[in-house]
Image: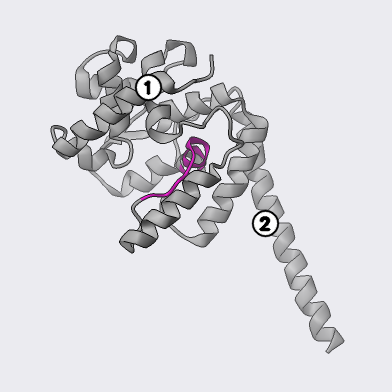
Amino acid sequence: MKTICKGFFLILLVGFSLYCIYQAEHLIKIISLRSHNPKYTAMMKFNEKDRLQQINKEWSDYSNISGQIKKAVLAAEDAKFMVHDGFDFEAMEAALKKNMKYKKVRSGGSTLTQQLAKNIFLSPKKSIYRKIDEAFITIMMETVLSKKRILELYLNNVEWGRGVYGIEAASRHYYGVTNTSLDAYQAARLASMLTNPRGFERNIGSEYLDEKTNIIFKRMELVDYPK
């Protein structure tokens, strides 16, 4: 019996050690994100299975990203970004209640940092193991990176349509202008697409999208963002 217990403990210890090494690799990559702008993300790699997809992406430094889009995205995705440490537990609880009400996943309650962790490092496929990895990476990102850098990375890597990544590519794709030329309503429109960019890209003039845009537009002035 003692031999079995020792064997089981050894397996757990080896498994835990390997997992720590796995997360240490993530930590090294996160540290490099302080100064390194990723050209390719896990989300892009996952979407490579769509052979018709061509990557449309152009980096914009934080100072060259419109304040309107910063406010719009935070109003749409993470209004408490400036005050949380990576997790919005109230939003998660509300999302759980909503999903239980409709008996399917309609809301995730993820913060912008959690979304960034998934987009850069993980598969979009949902599983308990991915959520655990996401949680560890989120904690490390919030510890190592500034809020300004997290928002900069998010706005330059989030998907805004089929093969369209980042705010500069999205601005040119949908409006034919640079992101700094967007007005407040256009910024709100783009932010409203983030929950389902490919779907809204095919139905850009939907009434539902109009309603979302109007809600975000009204919330924008209430949102603070890293200066």
Does the magenta portion include 209?
Answer: no
Name the residue located 19 percent from the left edge and 38 percent from the top edge: 208
Q: Please state which of the two labelled residues, at mark 1 or mark 2, is closer to the viewer.
A: 1
- Residue closer to the observer: 97 or 73: 97
Please name the amino acid that badge 2 sits on.
Tyr
- Residue occupying image coordinates x 42% and y 17%: 60
The answer to whether residue 79 is visible is yes
| Residue 115 inside the magenta-drawn segment | yes
Image marks 1 and 2: residues in contact by CB distance under 8 Å: no
Q: Disc 1 designates what residue?
A: 220
The quarter of the picture where the N terminus appears is bottom right
From where the camera sits, is residue 58 visible?
no
- Name the residue at the right extreme: 2
Q: Where does the image place residue 193, in percent across and percent down from the top left?
A: 28, 34
Point 86% across, 85% down: residue? 2
Q: Secondary structure at mark 2?
A: helix
Name the disc covering residue 19, or none: 2
Please tell me whether residue 215 is drawn above or below residue 27 in the rendered image. above
Inter-mark Cα distance, 1 to 2: 41 Å
Residue 90 marker = none
Give, as a three-letter code, the residue at label 1: Met
Where, by quadrant of the figure, is residue 216 drawn? top left
Residue 221 drawn at (x, y percent): 39, 18
Which residue is more in the foreground, 26 or 110?
A: 110
Residue range (magenta): 107-118
**Residue farthest to the bottom?**
1
- Of marks 1 and 2, which one's residue comes earlier in the chain? 2
Q: Residues within 10 Å of mark 1 (few under 14, many from 20)?
A: many
Q: Can you say whether 19 is above or below 146 in the image? A: below
Secondary structure under tag 1 reads helix
* Residue drawn at the location 50% of the way across and 20% of the way down: 225
Q: Is residue 32 left or right of residue 3?
A: left
